[in-house]
Image: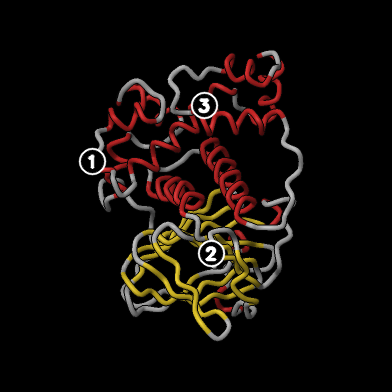
Amino acid sequence: MGTRGELVQRLPPADETLRRRDAGEGGERPGPAAPSTRMILGANTIAVHGLRAGGDRTSGVASGRIKLLMVRGGSVRIPSGGGFVDLHDGQGLLVIGTASVRMMPSSDGEIIAVGMPVDALPGLSLTRNSAIAIEDAALMRPIGAFAHTVHGGDPLDALSRERFAGILRDLVLVAVRRAITGIASPAPSLRQRATAILQRRFADTGLTPARVAAELHVSLRQLEREFQPSGRTIRQEIRRIRVLAAVALLQGDRSAELTIDAIAVRVGLSNGSSLARATAAEGLPSPSRVRARGSGGGVPSRAHT
């Protein structure tokens, strides 16, 4: 299996007993001693499932829905045809409904499950009742870190839920589009080209909207107009991308080796205080609480479902 998306198998229809009526998504059958928590974010869902070695779990996805399963710590074996597919920390599986997937953990860890309607991923030819393995951890880890932080953070108001639902949808769309081979992407819009610059150069402390406009050979006013439909300015988009990068570092394997000030500098901010202001502006917990959540404590969990 390559590092890009690959069809794992055509899957059997999901058992009707797995389906949930809320948000129209399939549910989970937990293995022994494997706690699960779940939250609804508009039409999207985020769930965190504890995995125990030897405790199988079946995940179902209802018609018209997709679910992105991301491994966080540990590893999972999934039956595929006459053999198995092994997914490890930072890798993922995109399941397209109606489908059911059996997951067999070979070591303890977590599965972060992000569910949303199929039409949230426009322009992609997704085969029903199938699953696509995504081995590239660089695509999966930012989504997993963001979803894990939102899921375990403080309660969200309606505006924050709408904002985070949009961010989550965009992250999944970009990752899946990049992972699937043989699907041509349309010519990038001005906003997409600007966002690509931000994603490449967010660590540059001198990155400003004016510099992005100059690099794209457009006026700053024209560039700002491109971002107006999203309800965010390009300056806010720079902040969002830096915060997402900081979250990935705060919850990464080397987090303990880096101070919060050092992480702030790595994402283009001056110090830990500026990072704290940025995370607060994006509706996320403080950097120290984000880090604590990544290590298994500090931030209150969502209610069990």
- Farthest bottom residue? 82
Mark-to-mark CA distance, 2 and 3: 29 Å
Q: Residue 48, relative to residue 266: is it above or below?
A: below
User: Pointer 1: what residue?
Assistant: 257
Looking at the image, which residue is at 54% across and 21% down? 235
Q: How crowded is mark 2: few (under 14 residues within 10 Å), some or many (20 or more)?
A: many
Q: In the figure, is residue 2 to the left or right of 264?
A: right
Q: Which mark is residue 238?
A: 3
Q: Which residue is painted at 52% across and 53% down in the image?
A: 40
48 above or below 284?
Answer: below
Please state the horizontal and vertical placement of residue 200, each as a whole percent of the image: 52, 32
Disc nearer the start of the sequence (1/3): 3
Amino acid type of disc 1?
Answer: Glu
Who comes first in sequence, dot 2 or dot 3?
2
x and y percentages locating residue 51 in the rendered image: 36, 69
Q: Determine crowd level at label 3: few under 14, some 14-19, many 20+ residues with C-alpha closer than 10 A.
A: many
Could you say where residue 33 lies in the image, as x and y percent from the top left?
A: 31, 74
Please name whichever residue, 207 or 291, is drawn nearer the observer in this view of the structure. Answer: 207
Look at label 3 and name its amino acid: Ile
> Residue at image x 55%, y 29%?
198
Badge nearest the viewer, 2 or 1:
1
Q: What residue type is labelled 2?
A: Leu
Residue at the (29%, 42%) spot, across then down: 291
Q: In which quarter of the image is residue 129?
A: bottom right
Image quarter (top left, top right, bottom left or bottom right) of the N terminus: bottom right
Quadrant of image for the C terminus: bottom left
Mark nearest the camera among 1 and 3 is 1
Residue on which the image places disc 2: 93
Residue 185 placement (x, y as % from top left): 73, 46
- Label at residue 33: none
Q: Which of 254 and 300 is in front in this view?
A: 254
Q: Is mark 1 on a helix, strand or loop?
A: helix
